[in-house]
Amino acid sequence: MMTQRTALISGASIAGLSTAYWLERTGWSVTVIERAERFREGARTSTCAAAPVKSSTSWG
């Protein structure tokens, strides 16, 4: 028997809501919490750098 996977996301920013959206699309049960009383105007940007990873069959 498979149990429902759950996630708690802290922050209703674009990153939090995007994460919630994609988790729900893959079958997760998601709860988003936000400390602000209402939606804020404007937006804050985030950047994310990805480092390439070289895969090898010798890793196991």
Image (spheres, rainbow, N blue to C red):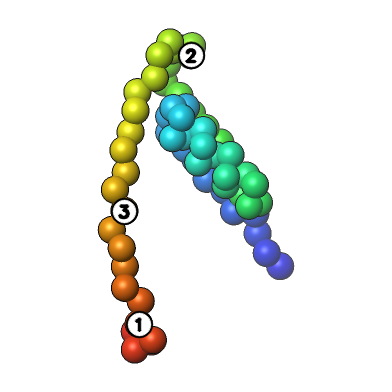
Numbered circle sitting on residue 39: 2
| 25 relative to 31, above or below | below
Q: What residue is pinned by disc 3? A: 50
| Image location of residue 8, percent across then percent down | 49, 40
Q: Which mark is residue 14?
A: none
Does residue 17 appear anywhere in the picture? Answer: yes
Provide the secondary structure element on which disc 3 rests. Answer: loop
Question: Nearer the viewer's eye, disc 1 or disc 2?
Answer: 1
> What amino acid type is highlighted by mark number 2?
Phe
Q: 52 above or below 58? A: above
How crowded is the residue under tag 2: few (<14 C-alpha within 10 Å), some, or many (20+)?
few
- Examine the image and state in which quarter residue 36 appears: top left
Viewer can see residue 30: no
Q: Residue 51 location, x and y as percent? A: 28, 58
User: In 3D space, how far apart are the residues under numbered discs 1 and 2 (Cα atoms)?
Assistant: 46 Å
Instruction: Residue at 34%, 28% (x, y): give it.
Output: 45
